[in-house]
Image (cartoon, rainbow, N blue to C red):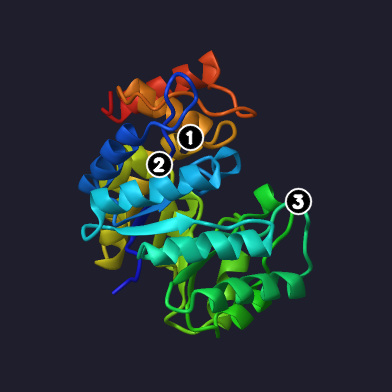
Amino acid sequence: MVRFGRVVTAMITPFKQDGSVDYAVAEQLAIHLVDNGSDGLVVCGTTGESPTLTWSEEYELFQIVKKAVGGKAKVLAGTGSNSTSEAIAATQKAAKIELDGSLQVVPYYNKPPQEGLYRHFEAIAQSTPDLPIMLYNVPGRTGQELLPETVARLAKIPNIVAIKEASGNLDRASQTKCLTPPEFEIYSGDDSLTLPMLAIGGVGVVSVASHVVGTQLKQMIEAFFAGKTQEASQIHLELFPLFKALFATTNPIPVKAALKLQGWDVGSPRLPLSEASTEITEKLKAVLKDLSLL
């Protein structure tokens, strides 16, 4: 059994026209995602525009999504911060409402050394010993990489149970797999690398593309684990143009545009992110039509 499931969607945060969080659409979207391939949801992660959400907005989203899909899917709170004390406070609040886990991003901007990273995550884990924690390595966003040797140290802490590996470096993921115990779970943090990550010991994906192709991603992963690698490869190749189109510019700009094309009223990203350009939107429209998603 995989603790958080095979397909975990990094869920977008819908906004109203006035820029406020649209909690009603968030609830509807959470249910839709779980009905279409998602085993779990990360709420208020990078894709959820966590840098521009207030803690009170995040806490409200945690509760709404938990109420909507709790019991059907795992709900993980994106409660990471570049302030250890803030991350602890937010994670403790998430634990009190009995979420299923927390996604903890590498502290951004302040670029702590590996020892600082270890102590940061250790302090958070010790503050909520009963809450499972997934580490999140995304150096393209944070400016610092969580090295496999540090992950191996952290994996000895009982409630640090998984990592979302979004470095884009398969060698790094392989090193992490070599250094951590078999029960420590590695998730791809890049949709286009999900299948290769499975081949080196990954268990699934924390996905953006699952907003629109969750069922297909689940089929790909299930085919791989059933030994049907040719079928898995075929699905991967069919979806590959979508994977690339969804990252043509800063996430979640393209996936919000894709959802709008499908009729979801998710609003625009909050500044400093901007809406998708006409060129990106037209490319997404073409890819979605090719996949019979429009």
Which comes before the other along the chain, label 3 or label 2? 3
- Side of 108 relative to 267 (left or right): right
Q: Residue furthest top?
A: 278
Residue 109 got which mark?
Answer: 3
- The type of residue carrying mark 2 is Ala
Q: Are marks 1 and 2 in contact (CB under 8 Å)?
A: yes
Which comes before the other along the chain, label 1 or label 2? 2
Camera-side residue of 31 and 64: 64
| 225, above or below 76, in the image | below
Which of the image's four quarters has the C terminus?
top left
Which of the image's four quarters has the N terminus?
bottom left
Find the distance from the CA under tag 1 to the CA under tag 2.
7 Å
Q: Quadrant of residue 107?
A: bottom right
Nearer mark to the viewer, of 1 and 3: 3
Q: Quadrant of residue 137?
A: bottom right
Camera-side residue of 114 and 234: 114
Q: Looking at the picture, how far across and down is residue 35, in whole percent?
A: 20, 46
Please give the residue where the numbered disc 2 appears in the rendered image: 209
Please give the residue where the numbered disc 1 appears in the rendered image: 246
Find the distance from the CA under tag 1 to the CA under tag 3.
25 Å
Label 2 secondary element: loop
Camera-side residue of 91 and 198: 91
| 10, above or below 129, in the image | above
- The type of residue carrying mark 3 is Tyr
Label 2 environment density (alpha carbons within 10 Å; few <14, some 14–19, many ≥20): many
Label 1 environment density (alpha carbons within 10 Å; few <14, some 14–19, many ≥20): many
| 54, above or below 218, in the image | above
Q: State whether residue 263 appears in this view.
A: yes
- The type of residue carrying mark 1 is Leu
Identity of the residue drawn at 50% across and 25% down: 19
Which comes before the other along the chain, label 1 or label 3? 3
Camera-side residue of 284 and 152: 152
